[in-house]
Amino acid sequence: MPYSLINFLRNFSIMIKYFFLLRIHHWSKNAFLFIPAFFAGILTDVGTFFLLIKGFLAFSLVASAVYIFNDYRDRESDRNHPIKKNRPLASGKVSELSAIVLMVLLAAIGIAGGFYLNALFAYGLLGYLTINILYSAGLKNVPLLDTMLISSGFLIRTLAGGWLAEVTVSQWLVIMVFLLSFFLAMAKRRDDLVLFQLGHAPLRHSSKKYTIEFVNTILALLSGVIIVSYIMYTISDDVVQRLHTDYLYITSFFVFAGILRFLQIAMVDQKSGSPTRILLTDLFIQITLIGWILSYVIIIYLL
């Protein structure tokens, strides 16, 4: 085998290891930064869009640092999990020292970049980093609080995006983002319980205070509240006057369909462990998301 090919394969193997260590595929969660500008109808402004791109990169670096810290803390328990045992630190594919050095470097660059862009945005980054350090250090073992802290991460992303784009984040948006992220976090806890019952994985400490019946009740409750909250948002006087349209309620169809499909994945298919994986692999979810975005773009930006 030619040396150049061997060298390429070696470098590619290293890249794959660090790709999963940084969980770059989870950077999609940081798209919540764009939500306030999108809902405000200013995402087409070139300056605002590229400013948010820079913020997305800064937030992604800090998020990757958080993932590394969490994987470092959980490396022993992850070795007993059917999927998590393949993570770079749990499997030993990446050394602990190199992971720690990379973690500190990513956090420093991300926070510094945040202050360069906007001080308030940087404080949001620091808040996100602090909450997740506390979460990984032990608060994730407290039932209900664990899922609330996960939800707060998405809420911070949304607020930070508003601060960076200088857009006021409405109370409706705050409510919907928190409830939706809490809904997804509870679905993931349900998946933990299913894997445990099937004997495929040990049960995390906080999940011992959950049952499938309890989680199903929460999911059913949240799905209804989320749908109603979104409908109320679309027909609220403030939104109608600010966006100069009373047709936004049409987009509710896609929210309704997306929520029902996710419930089907969680309760029928028993595969709600990774919302990111579902987003990237489920065609129905992808169609509803694209339909929601297109309908919103047409109503707000084109009509």
Image: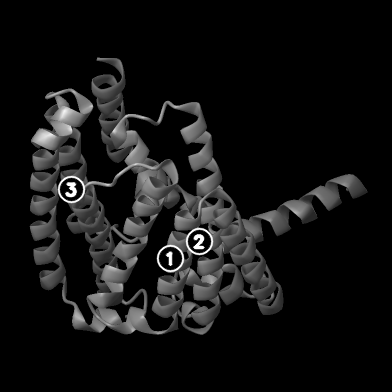
Marks 3/1: CA distance?
Answer: 21 Å
Instruction: Say which residue label 2 marks.
Output: 63
Label located before the other in sequence (1 or 2):
2
Tag 1: amino acid = Tyr
Instruction: Say which residue label 3 marks.
Output: 172
The quarter in which the C terminus is drawn is top left
Nearer to us of marks 1 and 2 is: 1
Q: Position of residue 270 (x, y in %)?
A: 24, 59
Classify mark 2: helix, strand or loop. Answer: helix
Mark 3: give few (<14), some (14-19) or many (20+) Cα within 10 Å: some
Mark 1: give few (<14), some (14-19) or many (20+) Cα within 10 Å: many
* Between 259 and 150, the one nearer to me in the picture: 150
Marks 1/2: CA distance?
Answer: 8 Å
Q: Position of residue 158 (x, y in %)?
A: 35, 51
Residue at position x 44%, y 50% in the image: 30
Instruction: Say which residue label 1 marks.
Output: 128
Residue 19 lies, with reference to residue 293, above or below; the image says below
**Residues at discs 1 and 2 in contact (Cβ within 8 Å):** yes
Classify mark 1: helix, strand or loop. Answer: helix
Asked whether residue 34 is in view, the answer is yes
Tag 2: amino acid = Ala
Residue at position x 49%, y 80% in the image: 74
Residue at position x 51%, y 67% in the image: 67
Viewed as shown, does residue 31 lie left or right of 251?
Answer: right
Asked whether residue 204 is in view, the answer is no
Residue at position x 9%, y 65% in the image: 217
Label located before the other in sequence (3 or 1):
1
Q: Position of residue 222 (x, y in %)?
A: 13, 57
Tag 3: amino acid = Trp
